[in-house]
């Protein structure tokens, strides 16, 4: 309700919006445009594998942008830049990180590099629009966190992916057997 939104705004609350999970669970659609209009910082989340199956934050960003346009029947609502801010700056601030989420002098060097030379990203007309409406986690080729190279040419450098997958599946089977 509008009263709830005002309470959130007055309380300085960050709202985590998980649109794909909410759609899958039939939980409804959060009034995100109204929250943003009241100055409530909304960030994006995936909720979790049990209620979403897909933990791709770029897909979550696209869903958030498109969902609110459709539900409100307004193609100008939730511009790509606003959706990306929810996924980056607002998300970092919600977690208490004040020196990350955007590239500024003095901030941590956290960034991703994407390969736009792919059929689903061609022709490249508006980079921001492509990131929000056309890309997915698979398009990220390089990741730098706090100036440290984490992924290069699609290969994660800081852990053994095969070992992680093996261990996750092994542990999951323990629950499955119970």
Image (cartoon, grey):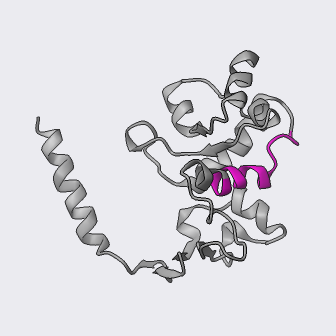
The image quadrant of residue 164 is bottom left
- Image vertical order of residue 9 relative to residue 174, above or below: above
Q: Residue at x 11, y 35 (%)?
A: 178
- Image vertical order of residue 90 relative to residue 69, above or below: below
Q: Is residue 87 magenta?
A: yes
Q: Is residue 110 magenta?
A: no
- Image vertical order of residue 156 relative to residue 166, above or below: below
Q: Position of residue 160 (x, y in %)?
A: 29, 75
Q: Residue at x 67, y 66 (%)?
A: 120
Q: Residue at x 64, y 72 (%)?
A: 107
Number of numbered discs on residues: 0
- On the picture, is 24 further left or further right than 105? left
Identify which residue, 160 or 14, lies in the foreground: 14
Task: State which quarter of the image contains the N terminus.
Answer: top right
Q: Position of residue 145 (x, y in %)?
A: 52, 74
The image quadrant of residue 89 is bottom right
Q: Position of residue 138 (x, y in %)?
A: 53, 67
The image quadrant of residue 103 is bottom right
Magenta residues, as a range? 75-89
Identify which residue, 70 or 152, lies in the foreground: 152
Q: Main secondary structure of the magenta part?
A: helix
- On the picture, is 133 further left or further right than 159? right
Q: Residue at x 75, y 29 (%)?
A: 71
- On the picture, is 69 further left or further right than 155? right
Q: Position of residue 86 (x, y in %)?
A: 68, 49
């Amino acid at each position: 309700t509008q009263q709830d939104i005002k309470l959130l705004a007055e309380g300085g609350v960050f709202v985590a919006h998980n649109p794909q999970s909410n759609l899958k669970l039939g939980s409804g659609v959060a009034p995100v445009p109204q929250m943003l209009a009241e100055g409530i910082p909304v960030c994006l989340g995936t909720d979790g594998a049990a209620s979403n199956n897909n933990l791709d934050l770029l897909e979550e960003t696209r869903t958030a942008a498109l969902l609110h346009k459709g539900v409100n029947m307004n193609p100008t609502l939730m511009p790509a830049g606003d959706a990306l801010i929810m996924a980056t700056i607002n998300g970092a601030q919600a977690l208490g990180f004040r020196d990350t989420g955007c590239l500024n002098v003095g901030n941590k060097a956290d960034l991703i590099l994407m390969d736009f030379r792919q059929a689903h990203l061609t022709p490249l007309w508006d980079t921001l629009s492509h990131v929000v409406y056309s890309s997915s986690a698979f398009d990220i080729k390089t990741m730098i966190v706090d100036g440290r190279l984490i992924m290069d040419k699609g290969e994660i450098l800081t852990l053994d992916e095969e070992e992680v997958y093996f261990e996750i599946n092994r542990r999951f089977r323990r629950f499955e057997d119970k």
